[in-house]
Amino acid sequence: MEELLIATGNIGKYQEISAILQGLPLKIYSLKDFDLEIPDSVEDGKTYAENSLKKAKYAAEKTGMMCLADDSGIVVDALRNELGVMTRRWGAGAKVSDHEWIDYFLKRMEKEENRSAKFICHAYLVNSKGETLYDCVGETEGKIMRELMAPIIPGLPLSSCFLAEGAEKVYAALSKEEKSAISHRGKAMVKVRDYFQKIL
């Protein structure tokens, strides 16, 4: 059985990704299994692809394992050039709680009539030497609701107010299966799953 490290310190992301890869002949680990964190200095890229690859390579270098990392963010039409790759570090900052971050975000959006937004995820899979095995992108269009429509999932505050196009409930109110089918990360990780099914 192959071993895979999901290179994220975000528990919400880890749970989403591992759920999609469940059932594959993989023994899946998290950074916490190695008492490892991705330092802020690694996530200083200008694109999702750059950040994702840097995180995957860093984790592979530190553990000698095959690693999967993703970098995600949201593009909000009303806040052009403000979030993107900086999403979790934007506004109130990366060190505040999920509740503080989303409160700040919703206040910024309070008077905006244009609520359109798009989530983007770029994922990279590298081998134990940090060499790229596979990479892919997932995107989901939608809109920002005016208030939280579901309890906050740890590490994923925007999921409680982002309504994907064609969906009746915000991300956080969907089942894991429903969210995986329409979310940006779900779309990317299904591609990763398909890749594993071909090679394992």
Image (spheres, rainbow, N blue to C red):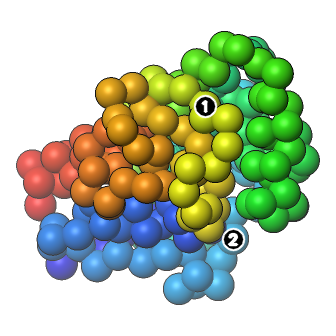
Residue in the image at 82% along x and 21% along y: 111
Residue in the image at 45% along x and 24% along y: 141
**Residue 38's spot in the image, x, y percent?**
69, 63
Name the mark on residue 120: none
Q: Which residue is mark 2?
A: 37
Residue in the image at 48% along x and 55% along y: 172
- In this rendering, position of residue 109 left or right of residue 177: right
Name the mark on residue 144: 1
Image quadrant containing the N terminus:
bottom left
Q: CA distance from mark 2 to mark 1?
A: 31 Å
**Residue 124's spot in the image, x, y percent?**
44, 44
Q: Visible in this render: residue 86?
A: yes
Does residue 193 sit above or below 50 in this rendering? Answer: below
Would you identify the image quadrant in which residue 48 lies?
top right
Kind of residue sitting beneath label 1: Ile
Decide which of 90, 112 is in the foreground and name it.
Answer: 112
Image quadrant containing the C terminus:
bottom left
Q: Secondary structure at mark 1?
A: strand
- In this rendering, position of residue 5 left or right of residue 60: left
Does residue 114 sit above or below 101 in this rendering? Answer: above
